[in-house]
Image (cartoon, rainbow, N blue to C red):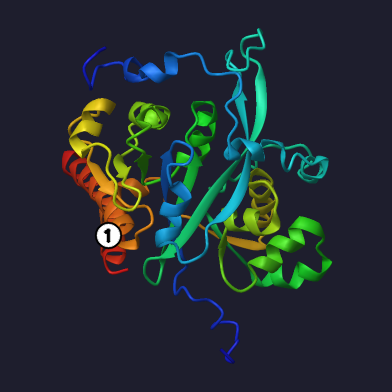
């Protein structure tokens, strides 16, 4: 690395192309582990201050109170080829943080909703959000290194997910399983782009 | 419950869980971050602005330009930190935020100013990246061979 000339410091011939996917799900479902399994870097944590409307969640009595919350997001980065850099953002799945997703989902290709089959209700806010915004997503049941407490079909039924949304089983600790899960999302993204191109 | 794909997107919005009253305390590690980084300085630094004119996404990558590198010694605080960190390799807004321990919104505002001043070059895909069949195909091939 001795050739530190002006030109050699840029690894990207025509500039990097950053793309983003979101990894959502309830607390403790393994989002950071999932991101870390495929990331080139140890997942980093960033803080985002988000303004949200109270809407009685905090029982303040006055509807429409605006509160600013700082939430932490863990994210990782994968150099996919000589230009494309894939960012994976793991976001808190609590419904009261739903507002931060508006910022985060802007420009995102899609989302992986991680589900712990013992606590499937934790994924409801994320599912509701992505469904209502027509964000492409897949549901990935984290089998926590082997154990599956319910079948993929049982989870699909319990979540009442539309049949065109893939429900896959994954292992957030395994690089190959995580890669496959990301690919299943990208396939949904591709099919949607192709369908849109065809209809235009 | 309406069947899936009903006309009104909000008809599907509420799953049973959301109807339930939330417990008064549902402490989590993720929430514990909520009191961190509420510094006065961050607010002062952006002159009170919450939004920059040119919006940078979380994943937008930034790299110092020639004039950015020249101006570096005259810069202070976060402006200097940003330029220094992306002097050689491009870094995303999110990475800058993490490395500087500054909330992402602050980095977005300060970096957007540096971009408009020609100190930083920004790289972000077009807004309709999700429709870009070629890019998505390339991404799939790349992820497959990881």
Percent coordinates x, y for residue B72 in the rendering: 76, 68
Q: Residue at x 65, y 32 (%)?
A: A69
Determine the chain carrying the residue at label 1.
B
**B131 on left or right of A15:** left
Relative depth, front residue between A13 and B67: A13
Above or below, B16 against B145 in this view is: above
The quarter of the image holding the N terminus of chain A is bottom right
Q: Is residue B59 at all visible to an observer of this figure?
A: no
The quarter of the image holding the C terminus of chain A is top left
Relative depth, front residue between A194 and B6: B6
Above or below, B4 against B112 in this view is: above
The residue at the far bottom in this view is A2
Q: Is residue A75 at all visible to an observer of this figure?
A: yes
**B74 on left or right of A159:** right
Q: Residue at x 21, y 32 (%)?
A: A154
**A76 on left or right of B72:** left
Relative depth, front residue between A58 and B140: A58
Task: Judge the density around disc 1: few (<14), some (14-19), many (≥20) Cα neighbours within 10 Å.
Answer: some
All told, the count of numbered labels is 1
- Please, what secondary structure does the residue beneath circle 1 have? helix
Q: Quadrant of residue A66?
A: top right
Above or below, A182 against B81 in this view is: above
Percent coordinates x, y for residue A77 in the rendering: 47, 60
Q: Residue at x 66, y 66 (%)?
A: B85
Name the residue carrying label 1: B140
Percent coordinates x, y for residue A168 in the rendering: 24, 44
């Amino acid at each position: 690395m001795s050739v530190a000339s002006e030109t050699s410091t840029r690894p990207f011939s025509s500039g990097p192309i950053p793309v983003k996917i979101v990894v959502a799900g309830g607390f403790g479902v393994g989002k950071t582990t999932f991101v870390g399994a495929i990331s080139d870097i140890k997942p980093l944590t960033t803080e985002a201050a988000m303004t949200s409307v109270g809407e009685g969640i905090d029982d303040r009595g006055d509807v429409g109170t605006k509160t600013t919350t700082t939430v932490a997001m863990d994210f990782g980065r994968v150099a996919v080829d000589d230009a494309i850099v894939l960012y994976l953002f793991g976001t808190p799945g609590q419904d009261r943080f739903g507002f931060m997703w508006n910022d985060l989902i802007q420009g995102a290709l899609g989302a992986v909703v991680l589900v712990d089959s013992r606590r499937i209700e934790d994924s409801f806010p994320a599912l509701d959000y992505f469904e209502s915004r027509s964000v492409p997503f897949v549901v990935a049941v984290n089998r926590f290194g082997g154990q599956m407490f319910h079948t993929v079909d049982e989870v699909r039924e319990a979540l009442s997910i539309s049949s065109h949304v893939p429900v896959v089983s994954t292992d957030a600790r395994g690089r190959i399983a995580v890669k496959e899960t990301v690919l299943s999302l990208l396939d949904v993204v591709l099919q949607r782009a192709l369908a849109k191109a065809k209809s235009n | 419950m309406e069947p899936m794909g009903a006309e009104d997107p909000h008809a599907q919005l509420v799953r049973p869980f959301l109807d339930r009253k939330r417990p008064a305390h549902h402490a989590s590690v993720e929430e514990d971050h909520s009191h961190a980084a509420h510094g006065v300085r961050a607010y002062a630094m952006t002159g009170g602005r919450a939004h920059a004119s040119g919006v940078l996404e979380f994943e937008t990558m930034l790299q110092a330009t020639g004039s950015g590198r020249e101006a570096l010694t005259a810069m202070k605080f976060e402006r200097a930190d940003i330029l220094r960190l992306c002097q050689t390799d491009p870094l995303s807004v999110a990475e800058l935020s993490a490395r500087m321990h500054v909330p992402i919104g602050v980095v977005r505002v300060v970096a957007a100013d540096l971009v408009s001043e020609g100190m930083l070059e920004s790289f972000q895909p077009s807004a309709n990246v999700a429709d870009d069949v070629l890019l998505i195909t390339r991404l799939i091939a790349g992820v497959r061979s990881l």
